[in-house]
Image: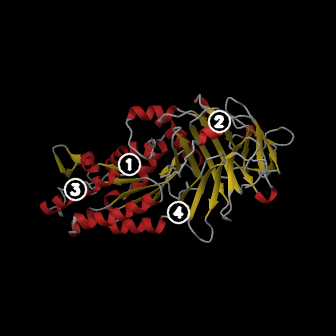
Amino acid sequence: MPRSLLFRRRRGAAEFATVDKITPANSATLSLWLDASHAPSVLNASGSPVKDDAEIVATWNDRSSQGLSFSATGNPVWRRDRFGVGRHAINFDSALLQYFGITNTITTATAGHVFIVARPTNATSSSKCLLSFANGGANTTDFDFFTAGGGVSFDWLRILAQNAGDTTTDIRFPAKHVIPNGLYVFHIWSDDTSVFMEVSNVVLGVTLQAGAYRWIGDIAGRTRTFVGAQAQSTIASYFDGDIAEIRVYSGVLSDSDAAACMDDLRWKWSDGGCRMFAGCGDSLMDLNSYIEKVAADITASKRGLTVSDHAAGGATVATVGSQWFNAKASGYAGAIIQGGINNIVAGTSAAAMFTVLRDTVESVRSYGIPCVLLNVTGFGNNSNWTADRQSNLENYNALLKTLTADPNVHLVDLYTGMGTAGNLKVLNATYDNGDGLHYNDAGNQRVGDLVRPVLESI
Protein backbone atom coordinates (compact mmCIF):
# COMPACT_ATOMS: atom_id res chain seq x y z
CA MET A 1 0.00 0.00 0.00
CA PRO A 2 1.20 3.58 -0.59
CA ARG A 3 2.44 4.97 2.67
CA SER A 4 1.42 8.25 4.24
CA LEU A 5 4.02 11.02 4.17
CA LEU A 6 5.10 13.82 6.41
CA PHE A 7 3.23 16.26 4.16
CA ARG A 8 0.50 13.75 3.51
CA ARG A 9 -1.06 13.61 6.93
CA ARG A 10 -1.24 15.16 10.34
CA ARG A 11 0.65 13.40 13.07
CA GLY A 12 0.44 13.44 16.83
CA ALA A 13 3.19 14.52 19.22
CA ALA A 14 4.15 10.95 19.99
CA GLU A 15 4.87 10.27 16.34
CA PHE A 16 6.97 13.41 16.03
CA ALA A 17 9.38 11.92 18.55
CA THR A 18 9.82 8.83 16.38
CA VAL A 19 10.28 10.77 13.17
CA ASP A 20 12.77 13.27 14.58
CA LYS A 21 15.09 10.53 15.90
CA ILE A 22 15.81 8.60 12.73
CA THR A 23 19.02 9.27 10.81
CA PRO A 24 20.50 7.40 7.86
CA ALA A 25 23.27 5.98 10.03
CA ASN A 26 20.99 4.36 12.60
CA SER A 27 18.86 2.40 10.14
CA ALA A 28 19.83 -1.25 9.95
CA THR A 29 18.41 -1.49 6.43
CA LEU A 30 20.69 1.18 4.91
CA SER A 31 22.58 -0.56 2.08
CA LEU A 32 24.12 2.41 0.28
CA TRP A 33 24.71 6.03 1.27
CA LEU A 34 26.56 8.38 -1.06
CA ASP A 35 26.66 11.92 0.31
CA ALA A 36 28.54 14.66 -1.55
CA SER A 37 28.08 17.02 1.39
CA HIS A 38 30.32 14.73 3.48
CA ALA A 39 33.67 15.87 2.07
CA PRO A 40 35.74 13.12 3.83
CA SER A 41 33.84 10.57 1.68
CA VAL A 42 34.81 12.28 -1.58
CA LEU A 43 38.47 11.72 -2.50
CA ASN A 44 40.81 13.11 -5.13
CA ALA A 45 43.38 11.13 -7.13
CA SER A 46 45.83 11.31 -4.21
CA GLY A 47 43.29 9.65 -1.91
CA SER A 48 42.79 12.82 0.11
CA PRO A 49 39.41 14.43 0.81
CA VAL A 50 38.47 17.06 -1.74
CA LYS A 51 38.46 20.65 -0.51
CA ASP A 52 38.46 22.95 -3.53
CA ASP A 53 35.51 23.81 -5.76
CA ALA A 54 35.66 22.04 -9.15
CA GLU A 55 38.27 19.57 -7.87
CA ILE A 56 38.36 16.30 -9.83
CA VAL A 57 36.92 13.34 -7.90
CA ALA A 58 38.53 9.90 -8.10
CA THR A 59 36.54 8.01 -5.45
CA TRP A 60 33.13 8.42 -3.82
CA ASN A 61 32.94 6.36 -0.65
CA ASP A 62 29.78 4.79 0.71
CA ARG A 63 28.86 5.94 4.25
CA SER A 64 26.72 2.87 5.04
CA SER A 65 28.05 -0.05 7.03
CA GLN A 66 29.04 -1.75 3.76
CA GLY A 67 31.74 0.88 3.22
CA LEU A 68 31.89 0.50 -0.56
CA SER A 69 34.17 2.62 -2.75
CA PHE A 70 32.89 3.91 -6.11
CA SER A 71 35.61 4.68 -8.66
CA ALA A 72 35.22 7.56 -11.08
CA THR A 73 35.55 7.52 -14.85
CA GLY A 74 35.87 10.68 -16.94
CA ASN A 75 36.81 13.05 -14.10
CA PRO A 76 33.52 14.24 -12.54
CA VAL A 77 34.07 17.27 -10.32
CA TRP A 78 33.09 18.19 -6.77
CA ARG A 79 31.19 21.48 -6.46
CA ARG A 80 31.75 23.09 -3.10
CA ASP A 81 28.75 24.83 -1.48
CA ARG A 82 26.73 24.10 -4.62
CA PHE A 83 23.41 24.45 -2.77
CA GLY A 84 24.44 26.60 0.19
CA VAL A 85 27.20 26.56 2.77
CA GLY A 86 28.20 22.98 3.55
CA ARG A 87 25.87 21.49 0.94
CA HIS A 88 28.09 20.16 -1.83
CA ALA A 89 27.39 18.12 -4.97
CA ILE A 90 29.16 16.18 -7.68
CA ASN A 91 28.71 17.51 -11.19
CA PHE A 92 28.46 15.25 -14.24
CA ASP A 93 29.00 16.21 -17.89
CA SER A 94 27.67 13.63 -20.33
CA ALA A 95 29.97 14.90 -23.08
CA LEU A 96 32.93 13.75 -20.96
CA LEU A 97 31.37 10.30 -20.28
CA GLN A 98 31.55 10.74 -16.51
CA TYR A 99 30.21 8.26 -13.95
CA PHE A 100 31.04 6.27 -10.80
CA GLY A 101 31.00 2.50 -10.74
CA ILE A 102 31.54 -0.49 -8.50
CA THR A 103 31.46 -4.25 -8.95
CA ASN A 104 29.60 -5.35 -5.86
CA THR A 105 26.18 -6.56 -4.76
CA ILE A 106 24.42 -3.73 -2.95
CA THR A 107 21.37 -5.60 -1.67
CA THR A 108 19.72 -9.01 -1.72
CA ALA A 109 16.39 -7.69 -0.45
CA THR A 110 13.23 -8.04 -2.53
CA ALA A 111 11.60 -4.81 -1.33
CA GLY A 112 12.90 -1.45 -0.24
CA HIS A 113 13.41 2.26 -0.82
CA VAL A 114 15.64 4.42 -3.01
CA PHE A 115 16.17 8.15 -2.38
CA ILE A 116 18.00 10.34 -4.93
CA VAL A 117 18.73 14.06 -4.54
CA ALA A 118 19.71 15.58 -7.88
CA ARG A 119 19.48 18.61 -10.13
CA PRO A 120 19.42 17.52 -13.77
CA THR A 121 20.55 19.89 -16.50
CA ASN A 122 17.35 20.76 -18.30
CA ALA A 123 18.87 20.71 -21.76
CA THR A 124 17.76 17.69 -23.77
CA SER A 125 14.96 15.17 -23.95
CA SER A 126 17.29 12.18 -23.92
CA SER A 127 17.65 9.69 -21.08
CA LYS A 128 19.97 10.70 -18.25
CA CYS A 129 20.70 7.83 -15.88
CA LEU A 130 20.94 8.73 -12.20
CA LEU A 131 21.43 5.24 -10.77
CA SER A 132 21.79 1.84 -12.44
CA PHE A 133 22.05 -1.78 -11.28
CA ALA A 134 23.15 -4.54 -13.67
CA ASN A 135 24.86 -7.89 -14.00
CA GLY A 136 27.17 -6.81 -16.78
CA GLY A 137 24.94 -7.96 -19.62
CA ALA A 138 21.77 -6.56 -21.13
CA ASN A 139 19.72 -6.87 -17.94
CA THR A 140 19.54 -3.69 -15.93
CA THR A 141 17.37 -1.73 -13.48
CA ASP A 142 17.77 2.01 -14.04
CA PHE A 143 16.41 5.24 -12.66
CA ASP A 144 16.58 7.58 -15.66
CA PHE A 145 15.66 11.25 -15.69
CA PHE A 146 14.10 12.78 -18.79
CA THR A 147 13.22 16.37 -19.60
CA ALA A 148 10.41 17.25 -21.92
CA GLY A 149 12.30 20.07 -23.61
CA GLY A 150 10.87 22.54 -26.09
CA GLY A 151 9.43 24.71 -23.35
CA VAL A 152 7.21 21.91 -22.01
CA SER A 153 7.10 22.15 -18.23
CA PHE A 154 7.02 18.42 -17.53
CA ASP A 155 9.86 16.12 -16.53
CA TRP A 156 9.73 12.45 -15.78
CA LEU A 157 11.59 9.66 -14.08
CA ARG A 158 11.73 6.31 -15.84
CA ILE A 159 12.02 3.09 -13.87
CA LEU A 160 13.51 0.79 -16.46
CA ALA A 161 13.89 -2.94 -15.83
CA GLN A 162 15.29 -4.82 -18.79
CA ASN A 163 14.70 -8.40 -17.80
CA ALA A 164 12.63 -10.96 -19.66
CA GLY A 165 8.97 -10.06 -19.24
CA ASP A 166 9.63 -6.79 -17.45
CA THR A 167 8.29 -3.42 -18.52
CA THR A 168 9.23 0.23 -18.45
CA THR A 169 7.27 2.66 -16.29
CA ASP A 170 7.47 6.40 -16.99
CA ILE A 171 6.36 8.62 -14.11
CA ARG A 172 5.73 12.14 -15.36
CA PHE A 173 5.49 15.13 -13.05
CA PRO A 174 5.47 18.94 -13.38
CA ALA A 175 8.97 20.38 -13.51
CA LYS A 176 7.92 22.78 -10.73
CA HIS A 177 8.08 19.90 -8.23
CA VAL A 178 11.45 20.99 -6.90
CA ILE A 179 12.65 22.18 -3.52
CA PRO A 180 13.61 25.87 -3.45
CA ASN A 181 17.14 25.60 -4.86
CA GLY A 182 16.13 23.62 -7.94
CA LEU A 183 16.87 20.14 -6.61
CA TYR A 184 14.56 17.18 -6.95
CA VAL A 185 14.22 14.73 -4.08
CA PHE A 186 13.11 11.44 -5.62
CA HIS A 187 11.79 8.58 -3.50
CA ILE A 188 10.87 5.29 -5.13
CA TRP A 189 9.73 2.34 -3.07
CA SER A 190 8.20 -1.10 -3.38
CA ASP A 191 6.26 -3.45 -1.15
CA ASP A 192 7.33 -6.39 -3.35
CA THR A 193 4.06 -6.32 -5.26
CA SER A 194 3.78 -2.69 -6.39
CA VAL A 195 5.97 0.34 -7.00
CA PHE A 196 5.32 3.90 -5.81
CA MET A 197 7.04 7.25 -6.21
CA GLU A 198 7.11 10.72 -4.70
CA VAL A 199 8.95 13.83 -5.81
CA SER A 200 9.86 16.36 -3.14
CA ASN A 201 7.08 15.14 -0.83
CA VAL A 202 4.43 14.88 -3.52
CA VAL A 203 3.16 11.34 -4.02
CA LEU A 204 2.51 10.67 -7.67
CA GLY A 205 0.16 8.05 -9.02
CA VAL A 206 2.03 5.22 -10.68
CA THR A 207 0.24 3.15 -13.30
CA LEU A 208 2.17 -0.04 -13.96
CA GLN A 209 1.91 -1.67 -17.32
CA ALA A 210 0.96 -5.31 -17.80
CA GLY A 211 3.47 -7.67 -16.24
CA ALA A 212 4.46 -5.11 -13.63
CA TYR A 213 7.83 -5.95 -12.18
CA ARG A 214 9.12 -5.83 -8.64
CA TRP A 215 12.01 -3.49 -9.19
CA ILE A 216 13.84 -4.05 -5.89
CA GLY A 217 13.74 -7.74 -6.68
CA ASP A 218 15.51 -6.86 -9.91
CA ILE A 219 18.16 -4.92 -7.96
CA ALA A 220 18.78 -7.78 -5.54
CA GLY A 221 21.97 -9.62 -6.38
CA ARG A 222 23.03 -7.27 -9.18
CA THR A 223 26.84 -7.16 -9.38
CA ARG A 224 27.37 -3.74 -10.99
CA THR A 225 26.15 -0.41 -9.62
CA PHE A 226 26.75 2.84 -11.51
CA VAL A 227 26.01 6.43 -10.57
CA GLY A 228 25.64 8.79 -13.53
CA ALA A 229 25.42 6.19 -16.31
CA GLN A 230 23.71 2.97 -17.30
CA ALA A 231 25.56 -0.12 -16.04
CA GLN A 232 24.92 -2.46 -18.95
CA SER A 233 27.80 -4.05 -20.85
CA THR A 234 27.50 -1.09 -23.22
CA ILE A 235 27.67 1.96 -20.95
CA ALA A 236 25.21 4.68 -22.01
CA SER A 237 22.74 7.34 -20.87
CA TYR A 238 25.34 9.52 -19.17
CA PHE A 239 23.90 12.01 -16.72
CA ASP A 240 24.12 15.80 -17.01
CA GLY A 241 23.80 17.82 -13.80
CA ASP A 242 24.43 17.54 -10.08
CA ILE A 243 23.93 14.54 -7.81
CA ALA A 244 23.98 15.46 -4.14
CA GLU A 245 22.96 12.31 -2.27
CA ILE A 246 21.78 8.72 -2.81
CA ARG A 247 20.38 6.34 -0.19
CA VAL A 248 19.28 2.77 -0.80
CA TYR A 249 17.43 0.90 1.94
CA SER A 250 16.95 -2.85 1.66
CA GLY A 251 13.70 -4.01 3.19
CA VAL A 252 10.55 -1.99 3.78
CA LEU A 253 10.84 1.05 6.05
CA SER A 254 8.00 1.90 8.40
CA ASP A 255 5.74 4.77 7.35
CA SER A 256 7.24 7.11 9.93
CA ASP A 257 10.85 6.19 9.12
CA ALA A 258 10.32 6.61 5.37
CA ALA A 259 8.65 9.98 5.99
CA ALA A 260 11.53 10.99 8.24
CA CYS A 261 14.07 10.16 5.54
CA MET A 262 12.27 12.33 3.01
CA ASP A 263 11.87 15.12 5.57
CA ASP A 264 15.55 14.94 6.47
CA LEU A 265 16.63 15.18 2.83
CA ARG A 266 14.24 17.98 1.99
CA TRP A 267 15.43 20.10 4.92
CA LYS A 268 19.07 19.19 4.44
CA TRP A 269 19.19 20.29 0.82
CA SER A 270 16.71 23.17 0.83
CA ASP A 271 18.11 26.66 0.41
CA GLY A 272 18.46 27.87 3.99
CA GLY A 273 15.89 25.39 5.23
CA CYS A 274 12.22 25.82 4.46
CA ARG A 275 11.40 29.15 2.80
CA MET A 276 7.78 30.04 3.43
CA PHE A 277 5.51 32.47 1.64
CA ALA A 278 3.40 34.35 4.20
CA GLY A 279 0.46 36.28 2.85
CA CYS A 280 -1.75 37.80 5.52
CA GLY A 281 -3.73 40.90 6.17
CA ASP A 282 -4.81 43.41 8.80
CA SER A 283 -4.98 41.37 11.99
CA LEU A 284 -1.53 39.95 11.31
CA MET A 285 0.51 42.99 10.36
CA ASP A 286 3.36 41.76 12.56
CA LEU A 287 3.36 38.34 10.97
CA ASN A 288 7.03 38.40 10.02
CA SER A 289 8.30 39.19 13.51
CA TYR A 290 6.43 36.48 15.37
CA ILE A 291 6.79 33.80 12.67
CA GLU A 292 10.52 34.49 12.46
CA LYS A 293 10.79 34.18 16.24
CA VAL A 294 9.05 30.81 16.12
CA ALA A 295 11.20 29.79 13.15
CA ALA A 296 14.37 30.59 15.07
CA ASP A 297 13.34 28.12 17.78
CA ILE A 298 12.58 25.22 15.44
CA THR A 299 14.74 22.12 15.72
CA ALA A 300 18.27 22.66 14.43
CA SER A 301 18.06 19.42 12.42
CA LYS A 302 15.64 21.20 10.14
CA ARG A 303 18.29 23.85 9.41
CA GLY A 304 16.10 26.84 10.16
CA LEU A 305 13.10 28.47 8.54
CA THR A 306 12.93 31.68 6.59
CA VAL A 307 9.76 33.62 5.88
CA SER A 308 9.07 36.03 3.03
CA ASP A 309 6.54 38.35 4.59
CA HIS A 310 3.68 39.60 2.44
CA ALA A 311 1.47 40.92 5.23
CA ALA A 312 -0.42 44.08 4.33
CA GLY A 313 -2.93 46.39 5.95
CA GLY A 314 -6.37 46.38 4.41
CA ALA A 315 -5.77 43.05 2.69
CA THR A 316 -8.65 40.92 1.46
CA VAL A 317 -8.71 37.28 0.36
CA ALA A 318 -8.27 38.59 -3.19
CA THR A 319 -5.19 40.74 -2.46
CA VAL A 320 -3.58 37.95 -0.44
CA GLY A 321 -4.25 35.66 -3.37
CA SER A 322 -2.74 38.11 -5.85
CA GLN A 323 0.40 38.28 -3.69
CA TRP A 324 0.74 34.54 -4.01
CA PHE A 325 0.07 34.50 -7.76
CA ASN A 326 2.77 37.14 -8.24
CA ALA A 327 5.31 35.24 -6.14
CA LYS A 328 4.42 31.59 -6.78
CA ALA A 329 7.38 30.87 -9.06
CA SER A 330 9.89 32.00 -6.43
CA GLY A 331 10.66 28.54 -5.10
CA TYR A 332 8.74 28.55 -1.82
CA ALA A 333 8.54 25.37 0.24
CA GLY A 334 5.21 26.27 1.79
CA ALA A 335 2.64 29.02 2.22
CA ILE A 336 0.92 30.58 5.25
CA ILE A 337 -2.27 32.41 4.36
CA GLN A 338 -4.78 34.40 6.39
CA GLY A 339 -7.36 36.85 5.24
CA GLY A 340 -11.03 37.61 5.46
CA ILE A 341 -11.76 40.11 8.20
CA ASN A 342 -11.87 43.06 5.79
CA ASN A 343 -14.15 41.10 3.46
CA ILE A 344 -16.47 40.30 6.35
CA VAL A 345 -16.64 43.93 7.44
CA ALA A 346 -17.33 44.89 3.82
CA GLY A 347 -20.25 42.45 3.67
CA THR A 348 -18.74 39.89 1.26
CA SER A 349 -20.48 36.54 1.62
CA ALA A 350 -18.65 33.58 3.11
CA ALA A 351 -19.21 31.61 -0.09
CA ALA A 352 -17.69 34.33 -2.29
CA MET A 353 -14.68 34.70 0.02
CA PHE A 354 -14.16 30.97 0.09
CA THR A 355 -14.20 30.65 -3.69
CA VAL A 356 -11.33 33.14 -3.99
CA LEU A 357 -9.35 31.64 -1.13
CA ARG A 358 -9.83 28.10 -2.44
CA ASP A 359 -8.35 29.09 -5.81
CA THR A 360 -5.26 30.37 -4.01
CA VAL A 361 -4.92 27.19 -1.98
CA GLU A 362 -5.28 25.05 -5.11
CA SER A 363 -2.51 27.06 -6.76
CA VAL A 364 -0.25 26.57 -3.75
CA ARG A 365 -0.92 22.83 -3.74
CA SER A 366 -0.28 22.55 -7.50
CA TYR A 367 3.31 23.41 -6.68
CA GLY A 368 3.57 20.37 -4.48
CA ILE A 369 3.99 22.35 -1.27
CA PRO A 370 1.89 22.50 1.91
CA CYS A 371 -0.49 25.32 2.73
CA VAL A 372 -1.15 26.59 6.25
CA LEU A 373 -4.43 28.47 6.71
CA LEU A 374 -5.22 30.73 9.68
CA ASN A 375 -8.90 31.29 10.26
CA VAL A 376 -10.48 34.59 11.28
CA THR A 377 -10.68 35.68 14.92
CA GLY A 378 -13.73 37.19 16.57
CA PHE A 379 -14.15 40.96 16.69
CA GLY A 380 -17.22 41.23 18.93
CA ASN A 381 -15.86 44.27 20.80
CA ASN A 382 -15.15 46.19 17.60
CA SER A 383 -17.49 48.91 16.38
CA ASN A 384 -17.88 47.13 13.03
CA TRP A 385 -19.30 43.97 14.59
CA THR A 386 -22.88 42.89 13.84
CA ALA A 387 -24.71 39.63 14.36
CA ASP A 388 -24.89 39.11 10.58
CA ARG A 389 -21.15 39.61 10.22
CA GLN A 390 -20.55 37.18 13.07
CA SER A 391 -22.66 34.57 11.27
CA ASN A 392 -20.72 35.21 8.07
CA LEU A 393 -17.42 34.82 9.93
CA GLU A 394 -18.47 31.49 11.41
CA ASN A 395 -19.66 30.23 8.02
CA TYR A 396 -16.36 31.25 6.41
CA ASN A 397 -14.28 29.53 9.11
CA ALA A 398 -16.36 26.37 8.66
CA LEU A 399 -15.71 26.43 4.90
CA LEU A 400 -11.97 26.79 5.50
CA LYS A 401 -12.04 23.60 7.53
CA THR A 402 -13.33 21.65 4.53
CA LEU A 403 -10.04 22.31 2.71
CA THR A 404 -8.19 20.14 5.23
CA ALA A 405 -9.60 17.09 3.46
CA ASP A 406 -6.30 17.49 1.61
CA PRO A 407 -3.75 16.31 4.22
CA ASN A 408 -1.29 18.89 2.90
CA VAL A 409 -3.57 21.76 3.94
CA HIS A 410 -3.34 22.61 7.63
CA LEU A 411 -5.74 24.85 9.53
CA VAL A 412 -4.68 26.82 12.60
CA ASP A 413 -7.76 27.61 14.68
CA LEU A 414 -7.09 31.18 15.75
CA TYR A 415 -10.79 31.77 16.37
CA THR A 416 -10.73 29.38 19.33
CA GLY A 417 -7.14 29.99 20.37
CA MET A 418 -7.45 33.79 20.44
CA GLY A 419 -11.05 34.10 21.61
CA THR A 420 -12.46 34.78 25.04
CA ALA A 421 -13.34 31.58 26.89
CA GLY A 422 -17.12 31.10 26.77
CA ASN A 423 -17.52 33.96 24.29
CA LEU A 424 -15.28 33.25 21.30
CA LYS A 425 -16.76 36.00 19.17
CA VAL A 426 -14.83 38.45 21.37
CA LEU A 427 -11.04 38.68 21.02
CA ASN A 428 -9.41 37.81 24.33
CA ALA A 429 -8.52 41.02 26.17
CA THR A 430 -4.99 39.71 26.76
CA TYR A 431 -4.37 39.82 23.02
CA ASP A 432 -6.43 42.91 22.12
CA ASN A 433 -4.62 46.14 21.19
CA GLY A 434 -7.67 48.08 22.29
CA ASP A 435 -9.97 48.11 19.26
CA GLY A 436 -11.36 44.58 19.62
CA LEU A 437 -9.88 43.55 16.27
CA HIS A 438 -6.10 43.92 16.01
CA TYR A 439 -3.53 42.07 18.12
CA ASN A 440 -1.06 43.50 20.58
CA ASP A 441 2.43 42.05 21.10
CA ALA A 442 1.06 39.31 23.35
CA GLY A 443 -1.47 38.46 20.66
CA ASN A 444 1.19 38.18 17.99
CA GLN A 445 3.18 35.84 20.21
CA ARG A 446 0.06 33.80 20.90
CA VAL A 447 -0.48 33.33 17.18
CA GLY A 448 3.13 32.23 16.92
CA ASP A 449 2.55 29.63 19.62
CA LEU A 450 -0.54 28.33 17.79
CA VAL A 451 1.26 28.16 14.43
CA ARG A 452 4.40 26.51 15.85
CA PRO A 453 3.23 22.84 15.82
CA VAL A 454 2.30 23.05 12.14
CA LEU A 455 5.58 24.68 11.14
CA GLU A 456 7.51 22.05 13.07
CA SER A 457 5.64 19.32 11.23
CA ILE A 458 6.55 20.62 7.77
Question: Residue 217 lies in what quarter of the image?
Answer: top right
- Say whether residue 172 is left or right of residue 407: right
The crowding category of the residue bearing disc 2, from other C-alpha atoms within 10 Å (few below 14, some 14 to 19, many at least 20), is some
* Between discs 4 and 3, the one toward the N terminus: 4
For the view shown, which residue lies furthest in the bottom direction?
150
Q: Secondary structure at mark 3?
A: loop
* Between discs 2 and 1, the one toward the N terminus: 2
Q: Amino acid at mark 3?
A: Gly
Q: Is there a contact, CB below 8 Å, between mark 3 and mark 2?
A: no
* Between discs 3 and 1, the one toward the N terminus: 1
Q: Is there a contact, CB below 8 Å, between mark 4 and mark 3?
A: no
Residue 279, numbered circle: none
Please provide percent x and percent y for residue 154: 56, 63
- Say whether residue 6 is left or right of residue 357: right
Residue indicated by mark 1: 407
Q: Amino acid at mark 1?
A: Pro
Q: Nearer the viewer, residue 110 or 50?
A: 110
* Between discs 3 and 2, the one toward the N terminus: 2
Residue indicated by mark 4: 330
Residue 436, numbered circle: 3
Q: Secondary structure at mark 4?
A: loop
Residue at position x 34%, y 57% in the image: 284
Q: Give the Cα distance between marks 3 and 1.
A: 33 Å
Q: Is there a contact, CB below 8 Å, between mark 1 and mark 4?
A: no
Please provide percent x and percent y for residue 33: 66, 37
Please provide percent x and percent y for residue 120: 66, 57
